[in-house]
Image: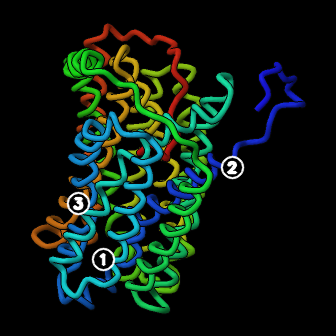
Amino acid sequence: MTSVPLTPAARPRTPLALYALTAGAFGIGTTEFVIMGLLQQVADDLHVSIARAGLLISGYALGVFFGAPLLTLASGRMPRKAVLLVLMAIFTLGNLACALAPNYALLMAARIVTSLAHGTFFGVGAVVATGLVPADRRASAISTMFTGLTVATLLGVPAGAWIGLHFGWRASFGAVTAVGVVATAVVALLVPRSRGDETPAELRRELAVVTRPSVLLGLLMTVFGFAGVFTVYTYIQPILTEVAGFAKSAVSPILLVFGVGMIVGNVAGGRLADRRLTQALLATLLALAVVLALTGLAMHSRPAMVLFVGLLGVAAFATVSPLQLWVLHKAEGAQSLASSLNIGAFNLGNALGAWLGGVVIEHGPGLGGVAWVAALVTLVGLLMAWWGIRMEGGRTERLAVKPCTAGEA
């Protein structure tokens, strides 16, 4: 890359190494969410209940929550390319183990092993991405990498559901394993060598910052605010087929509607957070709670259910930028660790939602009541946000940090 300043028209193309990171993000995003379109097949094949199959999402999410900070700290002094390759190897072998798992217990273990690569890959990958481009393109580089998660939700999950319907759920994990092999190869070939530069003193300062009450409250907003999404989305396949009356073949295209809504919500939430953070935080959480509640009314109408699956995608991912930006603002001086912890908080919310939905199905009103409970959970997050804003005196400060994309959840 030349050191001569370039005009906008003469700027270099996006480095191929950045697309290697995007490929890894796509694979990781697909393996996290693909199970939601396969719950019934997994439950039937392994002779477990739908609720117990839903715990496979909780197990993965908890693995991300605990694994991300631990692996990030443990690998802090390793060359970043080596870290990425180790993580992609864990991801690939974990998915292969999922495809071959003979029973529920081993499938759960394989899901947890696979999840360990998730948070650290995005944390380290973001640092690598910013080093591949000039300073004025770093935010765009991060956004490009996280596009992999967006595309995973839009295309990878519906594709996985289609493969599972026609070839069995194991074939879906086999396909993700193949993605992992390709992604590992392109990372090895295209990503340049680099080393981490964190010091123990910096880490101590970051730990002091992220234990501030305002930061911890922000993490709780994320957990409860987003948990409502997965209380419903985890069980979207049986809701669509058993309550709304869709054929199993309709699940994949309906998940595509969710993916389109996710993209719309992600853009809208980022723009709102850029302008007025506190209003965006309250408005998006309130909108999510309302959409979840109305989804409970829409379940018995097929057209209405398709509409509200799309609206759920919009409302869910509109909350991501405000929630992430709030934590980054309150953790000024330790934004890297805070961002990693908030990704873990999103996943803890995913685990809580999947578990709670299972409880409602097995011990409560069943699939038809899942959306109502989900709305109440998100309202808890909304109340925490309201309380946090009152603690701050209702200030709405413009931040010097660009909102994160949906892929960072």
* Label 2 vs label 3, nearer the camera: 2
For this rendering, which residue is in front, 115 or 183?
A: 183
How far apart are the two marked residues, 2 and 3, measured between alpha carbons? 34 Å
Residue 387 in view, yes or no:
no
Q: Quadrant of residue 381?
A: top left
How far apart are the two marked residues, 1 and 3, measured between alpha carbons? 18 Å
Seen from this angle, which residue lies furthest left?
363
The image shows residue 207 at horizontal and vertical percentages of 22, 22
2 or 1: tag closer to the N-terminus: 2
**Residue shown at 26%/90% (left/top)?**
44
Residue type, label 2: Leu
What is the number of the mark on residue 16? Answer: 2
Provide the residue designation for mark 3: 58
Secondary structure found at label 3: helix
Residue type, label 3: Ser
Provide the residue designation for mark 1: 97
How far apart are the two marked residues, 2 and 1, measured between alpha carbons? 30 Å
Q: Is residue 175 above or below residue 143?
A: below
The image shows residue 224 at horizontal and vertical percentages of 25, 42
Quadrant occupied by the N terminus: top right
1 or 3: tag closer to the N-terminus: 3
Q: Is residue 250 above or below residue 36?
A: below
Quadrant occupied by the C terminus: top left
Residue 173 in view, yes or no:
yes
Residue type, label 1: Ala
**Residue shown at 51%/57% (left/top)?**
24
Q: Is residue 376 above or below residue 50?
A: above
